[in-house]
Image (spheres, helix red, strand yellow):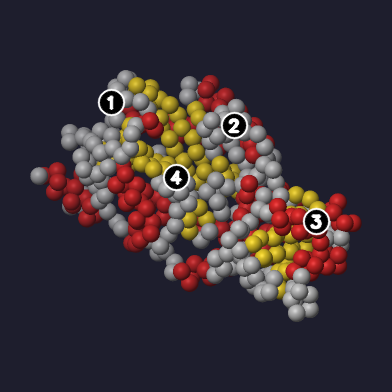
Amino acid sequence: MKRILIALILVATIPSLAQTQEILSQRDQAKLMDEILDDRLKHLLPLLMRREGIDMWVIVSREYNEDPVIETMLPATWMAARRTTMLVVIDHGAEPMEYLAVSRYDVGKIFQRAWDPDHEPDQWKQLAKIIEDKSPKKIGVNKSEHFGLADGISATDYDNILKHVNKKFHPNIVSAQSLAVAWLETRSDRELTIYPQICRLAHDIIQEGFSEKVIHPGITTTDDLVWWYRERIKELKLDTWFHPSVSIQRNEADLIFIKRPQPVVILPGDLLHVDFGISYLRLNTDTQQHAYILKPEETDAPDYLKRALARGNKLQDILIRNFGAGKTGNEILAASRKQAVDQGLTPSIYTHPIGYHGHAAGTTIGMWDQQNGVPFQGDYIMHYNTAYSIELNVTVYVIEWKKEIQIKLEEDGVFDETKGFRYLDGRQTELIIIPRPAKYIKP
């Protein structure tokens, strides 16, 4: 009874998420997203187009068959492209960039309508005329063999470009893969100001779920907790880009936790793991953390589990120290794995870019089943102002349990020219304890 009373007191002292951070209204979210987009188009895109040597970018998408890139360029109040939407960005060199919408409407504040159906009923002919008038040297279209997010133009739309555009420009039509990836992976200063707050929201929700407020050992199942997270995301008017997962490792003679049938009732002595992400203001998070369920006689997690977590943190440190502009993901992976093995770790590294998409475009550093390198995505070089989910695990033999366990961690961070890599909202270095130890009870 005393333990139950303590747990109730602890629940009462846990700050609610609403007390720590305000989530913007739908109207204010839309306003902020449009401000960020306008800033990116005016100040970031010109730099990227010149870096990648493309002076005209043509993005074509049909309603409900959206190019992943065009989704990031539509106003917040547009839920999809309208009919066939064509966006054209033209770099005139020293002159200001030109942003055209070969559409019946302006697209946001930046892309100005450049098609009058009453004058020219054929939309494709109007696009061809613009290309003829502007005479670009390189016409980038989102066609890519190896980066799905840069392969957004449909076969029909690509064929229509070739059909209608003067054949003298056909040699100038090139893949915009490098530009599309650059646009998707590069974070603006404004985005980097708000991204830590989004990661803080994700961390807060994880901790709220990993608490006695939600978990009642012997009753709550892993599936109960998963669906609590889904409901909580909706209650907070947020979204998620994947279904969360919760799993358990415990002192039993069983297979490693990823093989354990689900759902499982959570018990004292369990090491919990969550994989969780939210979507807010068009940016995504991806986080994996661990919690420990205290046994009745315990006030803290066992030292051997703390040491296991420290080995996971050590692998994180090794990986991020190898980040560098101009390095490929495969170079970073190989160096990090070698150093980790030399230091007595059993590593698995599968770190990915994050931003407008959860598994985003950019430099891939390993996959769980490709620890010797990832073709193409792993050969892409790292650039500044890009964000990553530092996702990895270490396998640790626990003598007390007479078996191996995995510490699976994932935290979001950014790589920039000033500070190198930094976590956007810190990382887990201590196990979350459930219930919270009595020392946190206010007198």
Looking at the picture, how far across and down is residue 205, in whole percent? Answer: 37, 52
Q: Earlier in the sequence, mark 3 or mark 2?
A: 3
Q: Nearer the viewer, mark 3 or mark 1?
A: 3
Q: Are marks 3 and 1 in contact (CB under 8 Å)?
A: no
Q: Which residue is mark 3?
A: 162
Q: Is residue 14 left or right of residue 289?
A: left
Q: Is residue 280 above or below residue 374?
A: below
Q: Amino acid at mark 2?
A: Leu
Q: Amino acid at mark 1?
A: Glu
Spatial distance from mark 2 to mark 4, Cα to Cα? Answer: 20 Å
Q: Is residue 2 left or right of residue 387?
A: left
Residue at 68% in and 54% down: 154
The picture quadrant where one finds residue 33 is: bottom right
Q: Which residue is mark 2?
A: 333
Q: Earlier in the sequence, mark 2 or mark 4?
A: 4
Spatial distance from mark 2 to mark 1, Cα to Cα? Answer: 33 Å
Q: Amino acid at mark 4?
A: Thr
Spatial distance from mark 1 to mark 4, Cα to Cα? Answer: 27 Å
